[in-house]
Image (cartoon, helix red, strand yellow):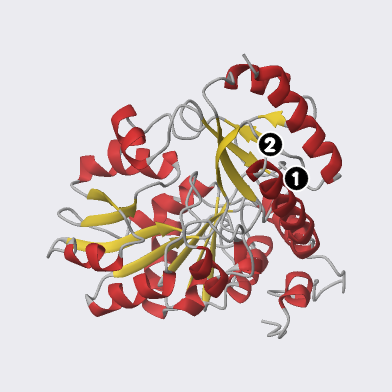
């Protein structure tokens, strides 16, 4: 661990830096499945790459340091990371989840873990008193996203963590939208932090990965056992790509956020836009809480157009901004949550939590902001009926 005080330095030099054998400044890609052992009965540092790999270990040390945790774990996808964390629970356990979460999180709980007798309840995690009233004897964890996907709902992570600790349950935070550069939930008292590292941490839409960080030795031991037993680990080449992506996280996010703030302000003043969801706007839900627990509003925006605008035409008219799943890459991406990222959530549930058929989610890239806004403007104009 480098223990650099400034995260901009830790992004580059943190975790396990370089290579002790060659003095290369980059951790090599240890593309091997197994390791020669010196003798029977001895305990080697490396034995099999599902259990441990030096390139993956460097990445895991890096995310632990960046999140100010004691241990990190790298998985083959964000969903593999979430699945490993949910595997901590047993039949009869119930998990409280935010009222708008990534559709994949909902799906794995609703369609997979329910077969094992692990249930969930969708709750408004912004209402701390109301949330406490929902903690019954079978509740074992609160899983939140803040800002949440796709309505950018802000939850007081410190308050949720204190509530969970009071009741002896786990607080789990999906920190994908913010990354440790903008927000560190473990410092706010959370037990487990999850990332879809495919997004901002990788940053270039060229790797699929998931990361977990904890600050408790017992939790670390349990997750290490689950990771090795279930085997959804990240390979060495993808681990290398992710370390490389993280090195530029600071400069990328600075540009992402600068662009997003301008885009949110532009959309808020546009005559065609009914509503904008962005935690960096002073009138946004949770603005003050987000300001307290995060560096800024991040780079994700959701918005709705008025009814006399055809969103299908809006999507098809975009030229620079790509209609695509995922987010957090250097390129600007737009999606329709109701039919894409959150399609697995039943219609009635989407309507109840506010994920309407007219909702548009925008991942603001690092292109020139004038080009981004010009593309959005012409697409809106083309969509007017």
Occupied quadrant, residue 380: top right
Residue situated in front as seen by the camera: 136 or 242: 136
Q: Which residue occupies 36% across, 61% down?
A: 126
Q: Which mark is residue 365?
A: 1
Residue situated in front as seen by the camera: 203 or 221: 203
- In the picture, measured across the screen, residue 189 lies left or right of residue 245, that is left
Q: Which residue occupies 43% across, 29% down?
A: 343
Residue 232, given in percent of the width and then of the height, sits at 49, 49
Q: Which residue occupies 44% across, 34% down?
A: 342
Q: Quadrant of the N terminus?
A: bottom right
Residue 200, given in percent of the width and then of the height, sits at 67, 53
SS category of the residue bearing label 1: loop
Q: Quadrant of the C terminus?
A: top right
The residue tagged 2 is 333
Q: CA distance from mark 1 to mark 2?
A: 7 Å
Residue 262, given in percent of the width and then of the height, sits at 74, 51
- In the picture, measured across the screen, residue 122 lies left or right of residue 231, that is left
- In the picture, measured across the screen, residue 284 lies left or right of residue 381, that is left
As drawn, the residue found furthest toward the top would be 385
For label 1, count other residues whose C-alpha is less than 10 Å away and answer few (under 14), some (14-19) or many (20+). Answer: many
Occupied quadrant, residue 373: top right
Q: Which residue occupies 54% across, 28% down?
A: 306
For label 2, count other residues whose C-alpha is less than 10 Å away and answer few (under 14), some (14-19) or many (20+). Answer: many
Residue 40, given in percent of the width and then of the height, sits at 51, 70
Marks 1 & 2, CB-CB < 8 Å contact: yes
Residue 333 visible to an observer of this rendering: yes
Image height of 15 relative to 87, above or below? below
Residue situated in front as seen by the camera: 228 or 330: 330
Q: Which mark is residue 374?
A: none
Image height of 329 relative to 53, above or below? above
């Amino acid at each position: 661990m480098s223990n650099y005080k400034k995260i901009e330095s830790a992004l580059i030099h943190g975790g396990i830096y370089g290579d002790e054998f060659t003095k290369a400044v980059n951790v090599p890609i240890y593309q091997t499945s197994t390791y020669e052992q010196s003798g029977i009965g001895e305990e080697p540092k490396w034995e099999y790459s599902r259990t441990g790999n030096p390139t993956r270990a460097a990445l895991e040390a890096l995310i632990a340091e960046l999140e100010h945790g004691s241990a990190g774990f790298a998985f083959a996808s964000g969903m593999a990371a979430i699945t490993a964390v949910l595997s901590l629970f047993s039949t009869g356990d119930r998990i409280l989840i935010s009222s708008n979460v990534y559709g994949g999180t909902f799906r794995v709980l609703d369609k997979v873990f329910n077969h094992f007798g692990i249930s969930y309840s969708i709750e408004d995690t912004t209402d701390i008193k109301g949330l406490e009233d929902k903690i019954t004897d079978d509740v074992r964890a609160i899983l939140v996203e803040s800002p949440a996907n796709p309505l950018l709902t802000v939850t007081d992570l410190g308050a949720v963590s204190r509530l969970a600790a009071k009741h002896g349950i786990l607080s789990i935070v999906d920190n994908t939208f913010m990354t440790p550069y903008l927000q560190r939930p473990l410092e706010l008292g959370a037990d487990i932090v999850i990332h879809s590292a495919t997004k901002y941490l990788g940053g270039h839409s060229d790797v699929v990965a998931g990361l977990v960080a904890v600050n408790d030795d017992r939790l670390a031991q349990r997750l290490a056992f689950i990771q090795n037993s279930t085997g959804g680990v990240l390979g060495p080449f993808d681990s290398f790509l992710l370390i490389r992506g993280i090195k530029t996280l600071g400069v990328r996010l600075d540009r992402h956020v600068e662009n997003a703030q301008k885009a949110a302000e532009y959309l808020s003043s546009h005559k065609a836009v009914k509503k904008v969801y962005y935690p960096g706007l002073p009138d946004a839900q949770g603005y003050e809480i987000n300001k307290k627990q995060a560096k800024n509003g991040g780079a994700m925006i959701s918005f709705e157009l008025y009814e006399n605008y055809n969103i299908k035409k809006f999507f098809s008219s975009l030229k620079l901004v790509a209609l695509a799943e995922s987010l957090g890459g250097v390129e600007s991406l737009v999606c329709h949550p109701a039919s894409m990222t959150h399609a697995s959530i039943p219609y009635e549930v989407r309507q109840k939590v506010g994920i309407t058929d007219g909702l548009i989610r925008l991942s603001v890239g690092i292109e020139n902001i004038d080009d981004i806004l010009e593309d959005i403007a012409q697409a809106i104009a083309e969509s007017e009926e």
